[in-house]
Amino acid sequence: MTHVKSLLSRQELIGLLFVAALIFVLMPLSMDIFRLNLFGKYLTYAFVAIGLVLCWGKGGILSLGQGVFFGLGGYCMAMYLKLEASTPEATAIQSTPGIPDFMDWNQITSLPWFWEPFNSLTFTLLAIIVLPALFAFVIGAAMFKRRVGGVYFAIITQAIAAILTILIIGQQGYTGGVNGITDLRTLKGWDIRTDEAKYVLYYVNGGLLIAVLLLSQFVLKSKLGRLLVAVRDKEDRVRFSGYDVSNIKIFVFCFAAVLSAIGGAMFTLQVGFMSPSFVGIVPSIEMVIFCAVGGRLSIFGAVYGTLLVNWAKTTFSETFPELWLFGLGGLFIAVVLVFPNGLSGLYRTYLAPHVDRLISRGNSGNRLEPVSPPPDLDGEATAKPAE
């Protein structure tokens, strides 16, 4: 209990409990399996938004290419699932049985060497973590060691997202092209398309999200987290104090990449496919919007922002199919002009003081004590303007 108190403040503990109640109680009790699976898909984007809070909100590193890492994790899982669904018996009608159908359609007669390791689930799970981390390390080392940052870094990551999308579409014989990798059926013989499987995957996804929130909170409360905020606010002062600023930036960029990849892998499991439409520039920018709406200084706000934006996107597209993009744009404009610190900023300004007073009243035998203005959900009172 002592460790929990040192890791989470009172406000942060309330935020975590509310997220857990929302994921594990409120949504399962109020939704059918179709809607629950839909919100499970939304929660996979929350992994990316949490990574952006650490990378952008805390570190001042705006990445417009997080879809790259989301896609890497998703494609790793999709490759394993596709190979399991492409047994010689299941593909007997193909010209070359035992390989994925899209390879057979493109006259490939043997499984490519880089697909072979994905016959192993253990290798696949390791690849979901290691490959995005290595790719992020290469990008981060190339950029941060040369002190490239700000808008230049954002543009470069956006270009990488575009390049990877073109590469995936162009190599359709190995990647499935524009259609992606589809028709994913089983995981170790377990049918992931049934309603029971969707419930299980939803709860696994929720559990992983709670674990990621706690891990991210641990990073923020550590010395590294304090250095990260210092780098954002006074980079030169941190450098002159003897710290290697580039290594700090590389770490948080790699950490955010791994979180995005975990979300991508869970997306593939829950939705049953992965395509380049989740890798490119547009989804990467949408992921930044999720973070901004929730509040780029709050890891809990990132979850709420992701759910709100995707719910609004689905609702608008169902009700006003020609106007939903205007609604999404209006929401983002409102964030920029009206509440720049997102949902977490609104909570901090209007609700947190009342919550503190209620808790203080209960802790002091119904005696109301003065409460100082609360920090945001992650312990900071101010936000640096976006770069």
Image (tube, grey):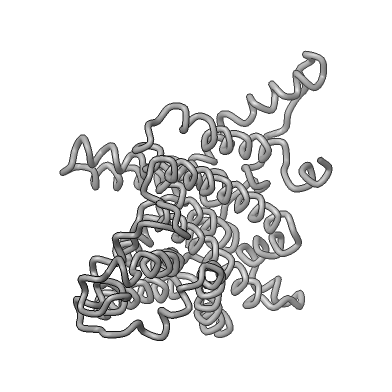
The tally of labels here is 0
In this image, 46 relative to 366: left or right? left
Q: Is residue 186 above or below residue 321?
A: below
In this image, 366 relative to 353: left or right? right
Residues 111 and 259: in front is: 111
Residues 303 and 176: in front is: 176
Q: Residue at x 47, y 44 (%)?
A: 202
Residue 41 visible, this orientation: yes
Tell me where residue 45 appears, x and y as whole percent.
44, 53
Tell me where residue 348 appears, x and y as whole percent.
59, 36
Residues 80 and 35: in front is: 80
Q: Residue at x 66, y 50 (%)?
A: 214
In this image, 138 relative to 100: left or right? right
Which of the 4 image quadrants contains residue 283?
bottom left
Q: Is residue 98 above or below residue 350?
A: below
Tell me where residue 117 appears, x and y as whole percent.
48, 78
Residue 68 visible, this orientation: no
Q: Residue at x 41, y 79 (%)?
A: 115
| Figure quadrant of the N terminus | top right
Q: Residue at x 56, y 82 (%)?
A: 141
Q: Is residue 351 above or below residue 205?
A: above
Tell me where residue 248 appears, x and y as whole percent.
65, 72
Residue that extends furthest to the left in the rendered view of this protein? 322
